[in-house]
Image (cartoon, coloured by chain):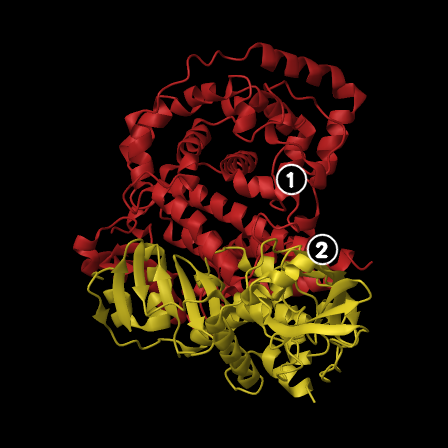
Chain colours: A red, B yellow
Amino acid sequence: MSSRGGTTLDAAARVSRGQLLAQAWALLGPGVAPLGNASGRPLVRTVRLILDPLVLRPVLNPRFAGTTIAAGDAADLTARISAAGPVLTATAAWFLLVKQARRRAGVTDGNPQDRHFQHCYELAHQHGHPDDVPRAAELADAVVAEARAATGRVTAAAVRAHVVDPAHAEELARLLDAAWSDREPLGAAPEPPRQLDDLLATCATAPDEQAWAALVDGRHGSRDAAHLEPPGSAREHGLTDRTSVERPGLGDAASKRRLPKPFDRSILERLFAGAATGHAIEGDVAESVRAEIGRSARPWQLAGEPGRVVLALGRAAAPALDDSDVRRAADDARSRLRSRWRREAYVHRVLRLPQAEAAVVPDELRAEVRGVRAVYLRRLWVRLHGRELRGQDVDSGLCWDLLDGVLRSVILDQRDRLRSALSRAATETRS
Amino acid sequence: MIVTRAADGVTVGPAPRHPERTALAEAAGALLTWDVVDPAALPSATIHDVGRAAGWLWELYGADVAAAVPAATQAGADVAAAPADQRIVEAVRTLAHLAWAEAWWPASALAGVPALDQDLLRAERAVAAAAVEHLLDDDEAVERALAAAAMPHQHPELAAELAAVAEDYGVALPAAAGTPGRAGLALAAGGRGDGAGVLVARGSTQVSWAAVPPGVVDAAAEAGWTIRRTGDHTVVDVSVPAAPDPRARTATLRARFGPVEVPLEPVRDDRFTGTAPIPAAALLLPAAEWAAVVYAPAVADAPDQVHPEDAARRTAIVAAARARLSATHATRTERAAGQAAP
């Protein structure tokens, strides 16, 4: 069995990155506690938003990437964390001040880690420790005020105002017409290339970079979208309720509770769905609307080829979820996804959740449990679309996190809905 | 602990065999389980992603077990565990036992096991999840736990801890509604076979826990049934004690007696009761099928009878729950229920 970036042959010479991080973190002392959890470990978001992108930078330093790293690099990793000690301690102190500023401003919503960690790191870099900064509290107030202001940010309300403004109606309708009448022909639906198989076999451990490059450069993601063209096919893939994909409207309203399937969403609903996740979308509203119009007419209705390749991977992997015949290596993405889906049946019994057949389960949810492939692909599209809106790239190293994370999110969402169906059934019968 | 390579991963220690005695936490790359009846200091692990699990195996089990996992063989090896951090073991154990308690806590007036305060349970779960968020499978486990929680003002210590977690994750929590007039622990009075007519037969049947939602039927009780003739027809009466839990008041139950479906009326005198006519032919059923199988149509449509060995296991689970009410290693939710009980 291999783990990402290594195999058992050199297991003795590899060490857990999580363990190294935890141990290096512990040496930084109590000053960084505000960035850690009650067990004294760095928070998940401290690793994701500060240590990885700002201190270790695994994109520039691939030796620091993965779940295990070579023993020879361990001392370097530890040294880098130690060297960042003062700035991390200052970041933690700024974070405490920002939390106080939130309290003063009466802000209780929005995850302060997501919103402010990187600002706090910038403050620490620019100004050092807040104890040495006169008027540090005012700077913290400004950070909170800036995060609350919607300037430079695409919000659902701003998108709606733009789309329904009569002054824009003609231009937007023309753009939508042009984008859809200039659609590139997709050609014949391709057979899955060898590289698709190679990447699924390796992406969970050590992604095959050549296969990834060949798929992206060969525009396999775009070509794979031809599989959605036959009547009923996009519907089977969970992306529309219609027999064939139709041009979206601009839209004039959107509601989080009643969002249609992805390809049935209006331009407004697509941007609304992205803005409603709570993760800010930076940028110009008019530009975002134009980009979304363009995106809607592209293969998979996404703008970037890497994202389309991930959808092709997801489309190739999804049948493995409820396919028990094929034997593949344990680390193959398809084996791992199937294993997660099967594990859920056990977890359901342990958590005493009702079976999909039970009367308490709404028909829609039952259909989703049984038709997990379509739900899976839909959620993957939503995730990739959200990344495009936020300008987040997709690379080979992210394939497995996306493929696995989306299945986890589908499963946990189904669990939450089963629980609420159970408690709703209990309270409704007597009221 | 025995570290073994299995078909789809590596196991550390044996996992409990029965869902209703399994306390489960989902860690990154592994399921962690404790047996509620026979609790060990450390959980068993079923590891499906050795790479991800390496991030926390060392702190839960120590360096030797962490090193033995990637090298595991089918023959298995016995490796001594030495947790690097006891606080982490305790937070994971709390999380796992709360998951068990939410699903299987055997509230019973007959056995003297009070119901748990669900608001406390959810609050404690969010606090425990936040303490070990770095090793959980779900990277939004804390947000998910907070979404179900409310401020438990009845427990100031937990309320203060929950408030801190909620602030760190930017979630505004509502105040807990409080547990409305808890059902008492008094034993329910008689109730079965007291209808008019000529008694034909009577008996009692175990209730399958999996066939009813949590917190509805007294976990230690059996469903009593009576067949009697009145005039020219025969009826079956079924009666089952409710759990001493507010959730019991809002449940809908039925009993299946051979071919007859008996709707059970809402709780009266802390019991669910119902009567239905029974065809004479049903009296010819083999004795083994003379049973009132209670179930909730919302969660189960083909209920099974309880096996005798299940009954013994359930007795052990009820005893374990009763002991947890005053055990120092139990969750605060369980101990609070123990202190509140008369």
Give the spatial CA distance, label 2 vs label 1.
Answer: 32 Å
Return the residue nearer the eye: A40 or A307.
A307
- What numbered label is drawn on residue A50? none
| Residue B195 location (% of width, % of height) | 80, 73
Which amino acid is tagged 2?
Answer: Ala
Mark 2 vs mark 1, foreground winner is 2
Q: Residue furthest front?
A: B232
Q: Which residue is mark 1?
A: A275
Q: Secondary structure at mark 1?
A: helix
Chain assignment, label 1: A
Q: Residues within 10 Å of mark 2 (few under 14, many from 20)?
A: some
Q: Quadrant of the N terminus of chain B?
A: bottom left
Q: Quadrant of residue B303?
A: bottom right
Q: Which residue is mark 2?
A: A425
Q: Quadrant of the C terminus of chain B?
A: bottom right
Q: Is residue A386 visible?
A: yes
| Residue A212 location (% of width, % of height) | 33, 32
Q: Is residue A407 above or below residue B155?
A: above
Return the residue nearer the eye: B134 or A150.
B134
Q: Quadrant of residue B221?
A: bottom right
Chain assignment, label 2: A
Residue under the image location 69 percent in, 21 percent down: A249
